[in-house]
Image (cartoon, rainbow, N blue to C red):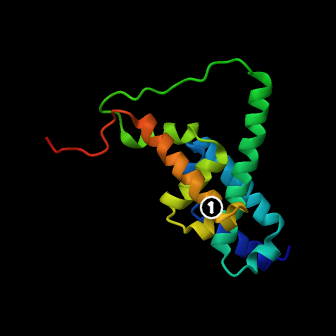
Amino acid sequence: MADDERAAFEAYARTGQRPAYLLCGDTEGAQDLTQTTLAKLFQHWRRASRADNLDAYAKTVLVRTFVAERRRSVRDLLAHNRNAPRPQPNPAPGADLRVTLLALLAELPPRARAMVVLRYWDDLSVETVASLLRCSESTVKSQCSRSLVRLRARMGDVQLYSTGS
């Protein structure tokens, strides 16, 4: 890689913001995911830097890496823990809504979680999410709908809006 290409990559890596924290739910996982994404971008920087929209290209790499890693880790976990009970978070009244939502997001399957984050946090269109995840638009719509129903059901009695009193 030429020095000017390396400098361009380093500048991009320093300024790029990724939704890694929302996907992973923890700082360490987000840092690992970001590093893996940057390594993949670095490996293919000539192609990536010529993309029409570098941020969209990087986001695609990030999301696909997240989904692939989670699938792999879920398979490994299931292979080692067939009969282990799943912990059920029971948010206490007054718990920080953000922490509760992150915990509930972590319960969603990786692909569904990626769809919800991209669709509702990043405010991407159904078409864009479908393109990023290589699936149909109807899959994005149905998965997001099911995920939101699941999140709402798990929220239970947690107050979404403060009354100010």
- Check disc 1: other Cα within 10 Å, few if <14, some if 14-19, many if 20+: few
> Which residue sits furthest left?
165
The residue tagged with tag 1: helix, strand or loop? helix
Q: Where's residue 54, x and y in %?
A: 67, 74
Q: Residue at x 78, y 40 (%)?
A: 72
Quadrant the N terminus occupies: bottom right
**Looking at the image, can residue 56 be seen?**
yes
Q: 9 or 91: which is nearer to us?
A: 91
Q: Quadrant of residue 127?
A: bottom right
**Looking at the image, can residue 19 be seen?**
no
Quadrant the C terminus occupies: top left
Q: 100 or 47: which is nearer to us?
A: 100
- Please, is residue 114 above or below residue 14 in the view? above
- Disc 1 designates what residue? 138
Q: Where's residue 112, x and y in %?
A: 61, 49
- Please, is residue 69 above or below residue 74 in the view? below
Q: Where's residue 76, x and y in %?
A: 79, 31
Residue type highlighted by circle 1 = Ser
Q: Residue at x 80, y 26 (%)?
A: 79
Q: How many marks?
A: 1
Q: Residue at x 37, y 41 (%)?
A: 97
Q: Where's residue 135, x and y in %?
A: 71, 61
